[in-house]
Image (cartoon, rainbow, N blue to C red):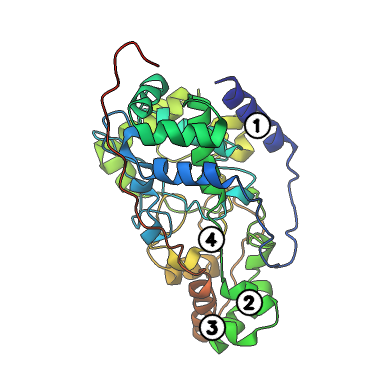
Amino acid sequence: MRRSLVSTLSGLLLFLALPAEAASPPLAPMPEAHKPKPDQVALGRSLFFDARLSGDGSLACASCHDPAKGFSNGKRLSDAYPGALHFRAVPSIVNAAHRKYLHWDGRITDLADLVRDHITDAQFMNADGRLVIERLRQVPEYEEGFKRAFGGEPTFGRILNVVAAFMRSVNSTGHPLDRYLAGDKGALSAEARRGLELFTGKAGCAQCHGGALLTDEQFHRLGVPENPQILAEPLRHITFRRHFKILGTPGYHALREDVGLYALTKREEDRSKFRTPSLREVGLRQAFMHNGAFRSPEEVVDFYDRGGGGATGKDPKLASLGLSQQERRDLVAFLRSLKSAPVRIDRPNPPAYQARALGKN
């Protein structure tokens, strides 16, 4: 809990230090990722798919971060713990090891803290960490796995660390953009190459989606339309109000829009700002923006071509682009090309419980 608080406070200090404008570096290949210890990755992989990490034993991390769907859920919005629904989209965990901020509002900056947040939060997996420990101690394979990885028994901190280790191991591989930047001009189609020129030039996408991750790691207000499901579906609206109440958001009971970063900083200029997502795996997505407002890259390109939404105080970088029909098609072709080779992970079968002799550790 203390580490989580430190991580959150550190994130807030970073928010307050952000410059008003920050130029992204040019596009670049993905850097080599730090390789976690193999024993920890293997154990974390098993736990990522094990529903025993949730309160009622019905949800695993992979329930929302499905490898077959690019480690997202293929929906406009996130599901939640049974009896609840969430009000934001599920981000992919691919390349999460390289991210500065986590969650759409960036409120967490450490992967192990992110795992803790999702295991224990009532709207996600709703589990008591003490109960999770006892469940895993009732599984001999997990007891042995923790001994190999740490030299000791399961603890809640070790559980968080091994799941985070697995997440750090999930990174882009064989990405067409990396191959193109390395000199393989055939890695992108002619349409995608023209789209790349637009992305870095006329369309101005690289102003916010630059660097190796295709993100400036900043927070912007774009005027994205609100997703009507959030207020129309009671279970989503309940989660929406609870979230902002817990964060102490002024006027949370009357909110009609997702205020994003403002809930953390309480600065009016941060109202409805969200972190710039990485576009590295955007070609795998079925919904776009923090609230799944758009269902296709064509809708996203049209939105930016119009200069974003009509909200006051939106990012000054947004302006009508004047793209032709062909330019819009080329830009979409480039966005659709942004997907790495699928991460092949066979779903492990969770090991079974076994009775322990009473009086033995």
Quadrant position of residue 262: top right
Mark 2 = which residue? 179
Q: Work out whether mark 1 precedes mark 3 in sequence or the reverse, and give the earlier one.
A: 1
What amino acid type should be assigned to the residue bearing mark 3? Ser
Mark 4 = which residue? 308
Mark 2 vs mark 1: give the one in front: 2
**Res. 53 visible in picture:** no
Residue 263 percent location from the top left of the image: 53, 32
Residue found farthest to the top: 359
Mark 3 = which residue? 324
Question: Is the Cβ of the residue at disc 2 closer than 8 Å to that at disc 3?
Answer: no
Task: State the SS at label 3.
Answer: loop
The circle on residue 117 is none
Left or right: 190, with 206 as reference point = left
The circle on residue 12 is 1
Task: State the SS at label 4.
Answer: loop
Task: State the SS at label 1.
Answer: helix
Q: Compute the Cα span from label 2 to label 1.
A: 36 Å
What amino acid type should be assigned to the residue bearing mark 2? Arg
What amino acid type should be assigned to the residue bearing mark 4? Gly
Q: Nearer the viewer, residue 165 or 193?
A: 165
Q: Work out whether mark 2 precedes mark 1 in sequence or the reverse, and give the earlier one.
A: 1
